[in-house]
Amino acid sequence: MTRGVALVRRPSSRLAEGIVTHIRRQPIDIALAGRQHDAYRGALADAGWTIAEVPPADDHPDSVFVEDTVVVCAGLAVLTRPGAAARVGEIAGSEAAVRELGLDIARIEPPGTLDGGDVLQVGRTVYVGVGGRTNRAGVAQLRDHLAPTGRDVVAVPLGEVLHLKSAVTALPDGTLLALPELIDTGAMPTVHPVTEETGCHVVPLGGDEVLIAASAPRTAEWLAARGYRPVVVDISEFEKLEGCVTCLSVLVTQ
């Protein structure tokens, strides 16, 4: 069974030059990152997702984090305007990929900025982190673009964290996994606090399968105890650049 299409983009040879904001820079093993990305793609394919390549952007070190370039909701692809100016050149490849899929297209325009990593869709509510990479003008534009889909867009102020989904993601039943010290979850229902930083990063793959990083074994055990099937991937080289399992793909359901 095909669940949909997973947009992915291969790592740049300049990955080690990627932006780090809230952590100390560490050496990146480019070859290992390539193998980890292959395994990540394989996990998505094994879960029933058809892999679609976004054209490479080797001159853009952060381009593997394709989630930041496009938000897909109800057949609409909103091309973002990244808060880091150096990443704006990544958008063209993502536009080509979503056009190939036949999606309707909208754009975030100046003065708005929006990173896809700040957008968390939970049912018909869309939480959007405001702070580091996404501004209120970007949130307002996203709200306008999604209004015809009936989504309720809720702005969430961020503190010392790169993206909203660096601090909270959602399980298929709507339960939010969050690291409370990174975000105020007062406006969010049904929050389960986690003790591992990468434990708040999950991607529902369909059915009972949930993608999670190998660096969160306790959270994976907790998921299994709740009846989910954790799909564990090692993304250690991307975690050195504040990456997580969510930002390496965009899942487009059919």
Image: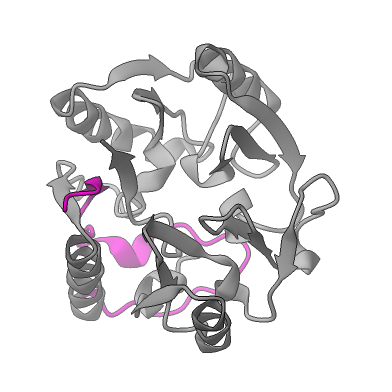
- Above or below — where is 248 with respect to 201? above
The correct choice, above or below, for 18 with respect to 148 in the image is: below
The magenta stretch spans residue 13: yes
Of residue 231 and residue 165, the one placed in the foreground of this image is: 231
Q: Is residue 214 left or right of residue 29?
A: right
Query: Left or right: where does residue 243 sit relative to residue 200?
Result: left
Residue 55 pos. (x, y %)? 14, 41
Q: Nearer the viewer, residue 168 or 170?
A: 170
Q: What's the magenta bit mostly, secondary-structure-wise? A: loop
In this rendering, the answer to whether 244 lies above or below 213 is above
Colouring rule applied to residues: one colour
Indicate the position of residue 244 as horizontal and vertical percent values: 45, 65
The residue sitting at 53% across, 77% down in the picture is 223
- Is residue 229 visible to us here? yes
Of the 4 image quadrants, the one containing the C terminus is top left
Instruction: State which quadrant residue 135 falls in.
Output: top right
Which region is colored magenta? 1-30
**Magenta span contains residue 15:** yes
Question: Which residue is painted at 78% across and 66% down in the image?
Answer: 180
The answer to whether residue 88 is left or right of residue 52 is right
Task: Provide residue 99's location: percent of width, then percent of height.
Answer: 19, 23
Q: Residue at x 15, y 51 (%)?
A: 51
The residue at the far right in this view is: 186
Task: Determine which quarter of the picture holds residue 165.
Answer: bottom right
Q: Residue at x 22, y 51 (%)?
A: 9
The answer to whether any part of residue 110 appears in the image is no
Q: Horizontal and vertical percent for residue 107? A: 42, 18
